[in-house]
Image: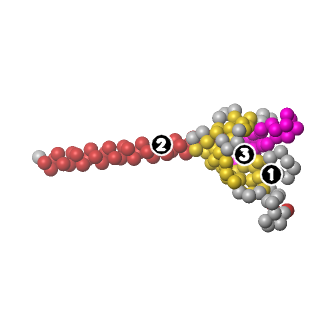
Amino acid sequence: MIRTVLSLVITLFLVSGCTTNQKKKNERKVDVIAHISKAQKLKGTTWYYDIAKGNCADTIHFISADSLRTHLGEPMDDHLGNYFIKNDTVFVSIKGGLYDDEFPIGSRHRVKPYDFKLLFSDSNLMNLNKTRTYSKKIK
């Protein structure tokens, strides 16, 4: 009798553990699918922040599902980097400038790596490090 009850308890414990593990795996799959979906929404889009009423703008161009290029309104001020999305936040890591090779190593004109975060919605990207909200550029 004790053997039967013990077998039943062990079986229930294993089954409930498998169900919990399967739920966690499914949750991870949903996170990955959501990340891919949001990254695909950003891929190929350009977002802008108007600095001087149409004369100068910062832009963020999402080149692929994980790389981007920013332009900070000045000539030759293009930065290249990578990004990933977690929930509604875009984590950006700038690796350097597009024109860094044209300046000597150690030059103040070379872009130093930096990171920033953007809060993502369908129509806006809010820079969480600055008080700027980028709007989606419609072509």
The residue at the point 63 percent across, 47 percent down is 91
Q: CA distance from mark 2 to mark 1?
A: 38 Å
Q: Contact (CB < 8 A) between labels 3 and 1?
A: no
The residue at the point 70 percent across, 42 percent down is 130
For label 3, the crowd category at 10 Å Cα-Cα, with few meaning under 14, some 14 to 19 and many 20 or more, is: many
The residue at the point 78 percent across, 43 percent down is 59
- Type of amino acid at the residue the image marks with label 3: Phe
Sequence-first tag of 3 and 1: 3
Query: Does the magenta portion include 56?
Result: yes
Residue indicated by mark 3: 62
The residue at the point 71 percent across, 38 percent down is 131
Residue 73 spot, x, y in % from top left: 83, 45
- Type of amino acid at the residue the image marks with label 1: Asp
Which mark identifies residue 64?
none
Sequence-first tag of 2 and 1: 2
Horizontally, residue 101 falls left or right of residue 3, namely right
Query: Does the magenta portion include 4?
Result: no
Q: Is residue 75 above or below residue 101?
A: above
The span picked out in magenta is 43-66
Q: CA distance from mark 3 to mark 1?
A: 13 Å
Horizontally, residue 87 falls left or right of residue 17, namely right
Name the colouring of the figure: secondary structure
Residue indicated by mark 1: 78
One can see residue 40 in this view = no
Circle 3 — which element? strand
Q: CA distance from mark 2 to mark 3?
A: 27 Å
The quarter of the displayed image where residue 20 is located: top left
Q: Nearer the viewer, mark 3 or mark 1?
A: 1
Residue 134 spot, x, y in % from top left: 73, 37
Sequence-first tag of 2 and 3: 2
Which mark identifies residue 27?
2
